[in-house]
Amino acid sequence: MLESAALLQAGLLSSAELTAACQARIAARNGAMSFDGSPDAINAWVRLYPEVARQLADAADARLAAARRHKGSAPPLAGVPLALKDLYAVKGLGLTASSRILEGNVAPGDSTVWRRLAANGMVLIGHTQSDEFAFLAVTPQSGNPWEPGRSTGGSSGGSGAALAARMVTAATGSDTLGSLRIPAAFCGISSIKPTFGLVSSAGVIPLAWSLDHCGPMARSVADCSLLLSAMAGRDPDDPSTDVGYTPPPSYPLTARAGRRPLQGVRIGIPRSLGSADAGPGEVYQRTQQELGSLGAQLLAVDEPANPFTASTDPLAFYTDAAAYHQPWFPSRAGDYRPPAVQMLTLIRALDLSALDYLDLHRRRAAFQAGYRAFLADEQLDAVALPVSLADPPLRSPTADPLILSPATNPENSRLLTYAYSYLGFPVVTVPGGTSTASGLPVGIQLVGAPFSEANLIQIAIDLQQHYPHFTQQPPGLASSA
């Protein structure tokens, strides 16, 4: 994306040309667009907006030309094509959370994120597939460009697939218990889950208000960083952004000089993560070697215990979802996908009291304080660990909703994203490259203290400068249209 942006600024490429190239790749690579998807289709998109994209691209080209003519400046994102997850509202366009429940729904106004990105001149290509209402971590209707029979991860799986297949240069996602990080890991791209409250979720269909994070997705962390600079900041329409913190004018975009740019950086390596499959285990070890080769000091650490390990704890945070879906569930249960029905049934069955809910957040606050102290006591810049201990699973239209309850689902307990969602701390996900065991990509998380995005981003950019795994493409793409 940064390369495209530089060409746009110099007038060596027009937004109309770049947008047309993205649309041609979508036509060549996406396969048929459908609600359920087909086994051999990527099906990353819910809706495409060719006329909207044309108008925005023309406006961006005019803006860029005027800036060059008058020796002024245009925003660095001007003219860059964008995909929005099908949770982000755009006034006058469809907004369906990839569900039949909202079929025909039209957004009455813009989400704050889209308003900010539009003000920066970005070009909306379309809305990408989400797991229905962002409930799960699989997005079964989309195929992974690395192997279409595999899951893209979720719930931002459509955005992950569109980026991995090089159909678009930038995308948004959302993350409640891993939905930015899991698709990034499974699709071999980068993402940033910001500190809770750094990016507004106003105008984004919610799942669990106290856990929902909006964030950028792109091929490289530098690309994500440029997006985050435009997305971050206080929003009067979202009280969670009133965090008493002003983000920097921009986040890092370039690597530091020298062969050992991570000299003096302290990175924690958790002693106990569980048993990893051959692929993730191999890539995680390789990432540690790469970090060490760049000068980072790697320290074996014991993280504070995650207090939310009971099978019902993750579901308890989703009690707000029961309230949000009350107009349609159970009266329209037949219009939901079966996993969503099971999920909503489980949530309603919890029947939490107000005291139970308050205790949930009391324990969360204690966990946050304990983890913050752990990072300070160990003087850690980051903690590094895989996103998942397993390769991307096979696609299944009836994915087990207990993906939110790892204590009762051994397969899904291998996701390592939950704790950092409860914390609300920032996480940068980088592709660690493919494993020799499966040929599939593996993602690595870099976790830091609240509002340490700039530091995490810089570490990740330095790593990607020397070990550019994000440039790897799914088989067959390099030679296709």
Image (tube, grey):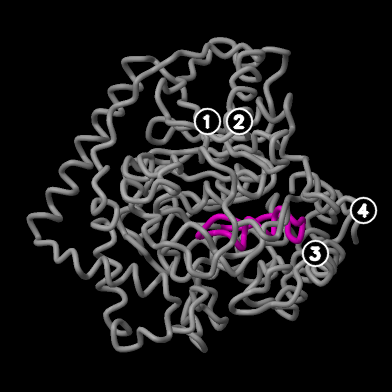
Q: Is residue 407 above or below residue 345?
A: above
Task: Tell whether 207 sits left or right of 465.
Answer: left
* Distance of label 4 from label 1 (alpha carbons): 34 Å
Q: Tell me the amino acid under the disc marked 1.
A: Leu
Give the mark nearer the N terminus: 2 vs 3: 3
Q: Tell me the amino acid under the disc marked 4.
A: Ser
Which residue, given by chain and number where applicable, does mark 1 sit on?
Answer: 456
Q: Residues within 10 Å of mark 3 (few under 14, many from 20)?
A: many
Which residue, given by chain and number where applicable, does mark 4 sit on?
Answer: 479
Task: Tell whether 135 sits left or right of 442.
Answer: left
Instruction: Tell us which disc is closer to us: 4 or 3.
Output: 4
Task: Tell whether 383 sits left or right of 396.
Answer: left
Q: Which disc number belongs to residue 460?
A: 2
69 or 436, nearer to the observer: 436
Q: Residue at x 51, y 78 (%)?
A: 95
74 or 409, nearer to the observer: 409
| Quarter occupied by residue 294 | top right
Q: Secondary structure at mark 2?
A: helix
**Position in image of residue 184 (x %, y %):** 59, 48
Q: Secondary structure at mark 4?
A: loop
Q: Residue at x 15, y 55 (%)?
A: 357
Residue segment shown in magenta: 152-172
Q: Residues within 10 Å of mark 2 (few under 14, many from 20)?
A: many
**Position in image of residue 155 (x %, y %):** 50, 60
**Where's the C terminus, which quadrant?**
bottom right
Give the mark nearer the N terminus: 4 vs 3: 3
* Distance of label 3 from label 1 (alpha carbons): 30 Å
Q: Which disc number belongs to residue 405?
A: none
Q: Which disc number belongs to residue 22?
A: 3
398 or 353, nearer to the observer: 398
* Distance of label 4 from label 3 (alpha carbons): 16 Å
